[in-house]
Image (tube, rainbow, N blue to C red):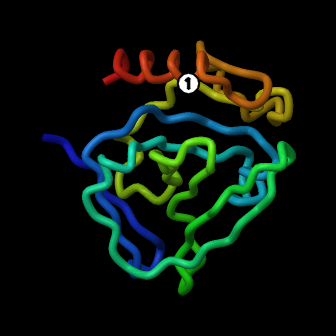
């Protein structure tokens, strides 16, 4: 069985997942700030598929424009974002794509918040959404991710 591993820049935090639901490029302003880049890469994982998470993390809570809180877990030593969670999906975590040891094993199924994307940074995914995802978009991403593997 395939597993996917990753961790922070300094090696204090390590994780392993056995599977993921989908990979998504997010062009929201919060992901741009979180990554210091043009977009963030989100790897959505059911909590049951997290086989290992070792090392202490700290949590930063941000209130999104929607009014919902987002809890980011990061390494207290090097500040690498590891994962985050939202209350709307308590059985899932979103891992930062850049924290994986081999991002080449992951293929983006779609992108969201394309209305705020930098014109030169859009991926041109078949599945895209101008703003926040809904359940139909999430279901389409899960289906597309299965095709891409």
Rendered view: 141 above or below 46: above
Above or below, comparing residue 100 to residue 140 in the picture:
below
Circle 1 sits on which residue? Answer: 138
At a point 44% along the width and 23% down the height, the residue shown is 142
Instruction: Say if 127 sits above or below 80 in the image.
Output: above
The residue at the point 47 percent across, 73 percent down is 9
Q: Quadrant of the C terminus?
A: top left
**Which residue is most to the left?**
1
Residue extending furthest toward the bottom: 77
Q: Point out residue 131 in the picture as x, y percentages from the top left corner.
A: 79, 28
For label 1, the crowd category at 10 Å Cα-Cα, with few meaning under 14, some 14 to 19 and many 20 or more, is some
Relative to 28, is 15 above or below?
below
Q: Is residue 81 left or right of residue 27?
A: left
Q: If the image is split into quadrants, where does the N terminus sit? A: top left
Between residue 64 and residue 121, name the one nearer to us. Answer: 64
Q: Residue at x 52, y 48 (%)?
A: 90
Front residue of 7/38: it is 7
The image position of residue 93, as x and y in percent, is 49, 50
Which residue corresponds to the image point at 40% horizontal and 75% vertical from the top-left?
13
Instruction: Say which element carries label 1.
Output: helix
7 displayed left or right of 29: left
Numbered marks: total? 1
Left or right: where does residue 10 sit relative to residue 62? left
Q: Position of residue 84 (x, y in %)?
A: 57, 57
Quarter location, residue 148:
top left
Residue 12 percent across, percent down from the top left: 40, 81
């Amino acid at each position: 069985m395939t597993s996917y591993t990753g961790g922070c820049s300094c090696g204090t935090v390590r994780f392993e997942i056995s599977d993921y639901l989908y990979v998504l490029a997010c062009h929201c302003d919060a992901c741009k700030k979180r990554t210091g880049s043009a977009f963030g890469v989100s790897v959505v994982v059911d909590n049951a598929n997290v086989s290992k998470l070792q090392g202490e993390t700290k949590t930063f809570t941000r209130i999104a424009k929607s009014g919902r809180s987002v809890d980011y877990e990061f390494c207290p030593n090097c500040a690498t974002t590891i994962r985050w969670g939202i209350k709307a999906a308590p059985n899932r975590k979103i891992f930062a794509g850049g924290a994986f040891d081999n991002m080449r094993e992951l293929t983006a199924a779609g992108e969201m918040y394309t209305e705020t994307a930098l014109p030169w940074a859009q991926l041109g995914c078949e599945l895209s959404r101008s703003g926040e995802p809904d359940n139909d978009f999430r279901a389409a991403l899960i289906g597309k991710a299965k095709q891409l593997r």
